[in-house]
Amino acid sequence: MALGPHLRQPTLFAATLALVAAFSVSPARADRCEDIAKELKNQIDGLKISVNTGNMIYLTHPAAKEFSLGCRGRNYSNELYAKTDRKPKPAFFELIASAGAIVFTIPKQDVATGSSRCIKRMGILRGDKISMRFRRLNMECTRTKAEASIVVTRGKDE
């Protein structure tokens, strides 16, 4: 049984529309990690995006020797890594607080308090590697004879 001419036209139009929709290209969308890096660059003075390698974005800032943003690791959703001199300057703590507030969407003062506590706990009594948790953030601070570093992460389930 053949369809009448009045039924063939809408069916052909619907089939063509479905075919075009299936093969249409959606616009490219940057992933969340790149969006966070761009937001960091726009919000923090002196910060530059240097290299993007998969799920690590390396950044540069005058207050830090090394600075990077990691996204979607095995056990964490976001990671912020920074390295500076053995005795960090206030500008370093300001950088960590500003970046942590943007990356982890928590108050800047909470990140500043947690990062300064972590770095200041290192010493003769507690050693050169400190792991602590503050306001749903995991912080790990290490130091050598010349440098100190901090890694701030948030678990995937938080």
Image: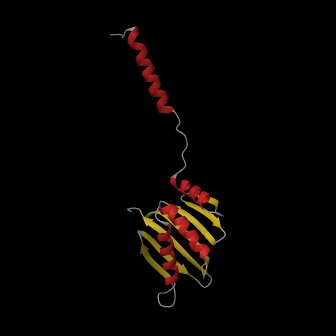
Please state if 118 lies on the left or on the right of 86 as rendered. left
Please state if 14 lies on the left or on the right of 143 as rendered. left
Which of the 4 quarters of the picture holds residue 133?
Answer: bottom left
Can you say whether 129 is above or below 110 in the image?
A: below
Q: Is residue 101 visible?
A: yes
Which is nearer the eye, 45 or 127?
45
The spot of residue 107 in percent (x, y) is 47, 65
Residue placed at 44% from the left, 64% from the top? 76
Q: How is the image coloured?
A: secondary structure
Can you say whether 83 is above or below 103 in the image?
A: below
The spot of residue 158 in percent (x, y) is 39, 62
Q: Check the picture and name the quadrant holding the N terminus.
A: top left
Which is nearer the eye, 7 or 46?
46
Which is nearer the eye, 54 or 150?
150
Can you say whether 59 is above or below 12 in the image?
A: below
Residue placed at 59% from the left, 55% from the top? 38
